[in-house]
Structures are given as structure tokens and as C-alpha cells.
Image (cartoon, coloured by chain):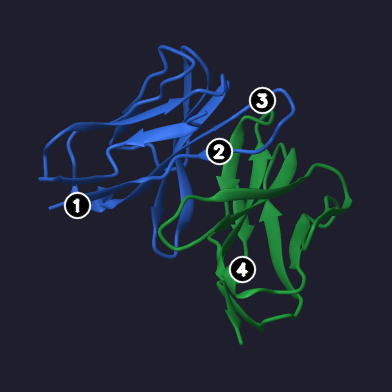
Chain colours: A green, B blue
Amino acid sequence: GQSLEQPSEVTAVEGAIVQINCTYQTSGFYGLSWYQQHDGGAPTFLSYNALDGLEETGRFSSFLSRSDSYGYLLLQELQMKDSASYFCAVFTGGGNKLTFGTGTQLKVEL
Amino acid sequence: NAGVTQTPKFQVLKTGQSMTLQCAQDMNHEYMSWYRQDPGMGLRLIHYSVGAGITDQGEVPNGYNVSRSTTEDFPLRLLSAAPSQTSVYFCASSDLTGNTEAFFGQGTRLTVV
């Protein structure tokens, strides 16, 4: 089976930088995704890494190291609206199966 | 463009009742899936499908059935509801031909009493 580990909660101040880590154990790994979910809402896609390295999308960046089975989401210039849960997810089984971690709740404070 | 549409948004069932959660997408996506979300448990995969006529089990399939007769629809059936199935259910779809973004419906909040 698959397992993904993330910190359960992270707190940071507005304007700061925060990194949310994800380690995974899986077979047939295809790529690592990140999703954001606000309270009461649906998850929304943030990024996807299939190859090692850093992918940047605006204030958000995502990193993957396949050899270490590790990735992270980096959020810069934090804003109050970034307070949400963040999930890493792995594609396995020929890219057909998307399995999520338990999520990290990010609290942004003034 | 509606994206992924789930119905109903809220539902209360009595133990032992059956029901079907509907999910439809209008993006011609091959991949569709159902997740349940419980506090502290993240999103757990129930069943998924890579195309019409093809379904497979996820992590927590017991008590649920699915079918995929068309590309657009992927209903989830609860055969005999139990309080342990009280949860928020999300349907998702994605394109398997390179675009890896999964699109989620707005969720169904199910309570079994």
C-alpha cells in the first residue's frame, strides 16, 4: 500500500515563508501533487512534480526528491487567506491512482 | 462549464438504508474517483475508475459499490448505511493523458443515524 506523512499543523506569521514536508512510501510512484482545502470547501490543485527539482507557481513552489521519497510545498509571502489544509498526494499504479496524505493545517497569524 | 457536480450536498440516512451519491463531470475525463474525508484522516480513496466499464477498489471500499456506464457519470452506492459511514464524500475527475490536475466536486455531507 501507500503511506504519506505530513506534519499535522504548522503556524506562521503573515509575510513569512513556510515549508510543509511530505515523505512517502509507495510502489509504482509516478508523481507528487499538492492540494489546498479551505474549511468546508473542496480540495483544489496547487502543483505536480514528476521529476526531481523545484516547480514554481507564483508564491507557491513544490520540490521533489524521488531518491529520498520526499517532497515539500513552499509558501512565500504568506497571506491570511493561505490559512487552510494542505495535502500531498501520490500518483501510483500507472498514474491511475491518487492517494492523499492526512493533511497539514496551516494557520497564518498577524 | 460545470466541472464536477455532486448531488446531494447534504443527506441524513437511517442505519440500514441505501442510497446513491451522484457524480457527473463534463470535461470528458477518463479518471474518476470517490473519496471520504473524516477529521484527522485526510482523503481516503474508496473506488476509482479509469474509463467506462472499468472500476477498481481503493483503500476503504467495504460497504460501497460503484459502476461506470458512461464517461460522464460515476455514482457511489451505499448498500446498507452504517454510522461509521458518516463522513464527507468527494468525487474527483482528471484527464489521464498528461494533465494531472484532479478536479473535485463540492462534496456530500452524509450523516447516518
x then y, percent, for residue A35: 61, 53
The residue under label 3 is B96
Residue under label 1, please give it: B83
Residue B28 seen in render: yes
Q: Please say if B61 is above or below A36.
A: above
Packing grade of label 1 (10 A; few <14, some 14-19, many >=20) is some
Q: Amino acid at mark 2?
A: Phe
Q: Quadrant of residue B34?
A: top left
* Chain label for disc 2: B
Q: Are marks 4 and 1 in contact (CB under 8 Å)?
A: no
Decide if residue B91 is on the left or right side of residue A17: left
Label 3 sits on what residue type? Leu
Q: Give the residue at the far right of this rendering.
A: A53
Pair 1/3: label in front: 3
Q: Are marks 4 and 1 on the same chain?
A: no
B19 sits to left or right of B74: left
Camera-nearest label, 2 or 1:
2
| Residue located 29% across and 44% down the image | B9
Say yes or no: labels 4 and 3 on the same chain. no
Measure the C-alpha gap from mark 4 to mark 3. Answer: 29 Å
- Tell which residue pokes out farthest to the bottom in this image: A110
Query: Where's residue A16, x and y in %?
Result: 75, 80
| Residue at 45% over, 40% down | B105
> Is B96 left, or right, of B23 in this rendering?
right
Q: Which residue is mark 2?
A: B103
Among the two numbered marks 2 and 1 on one chain, the one whose residue lies closer to the N terminus: 1
CA–CA distance in space, label 2 to label 3: 12 Å
Type of amino acid under label 1: Pro
Query: Residue shown at 12%/37% (left/top)?
Result: B17
Label 4 sits on residue = A82
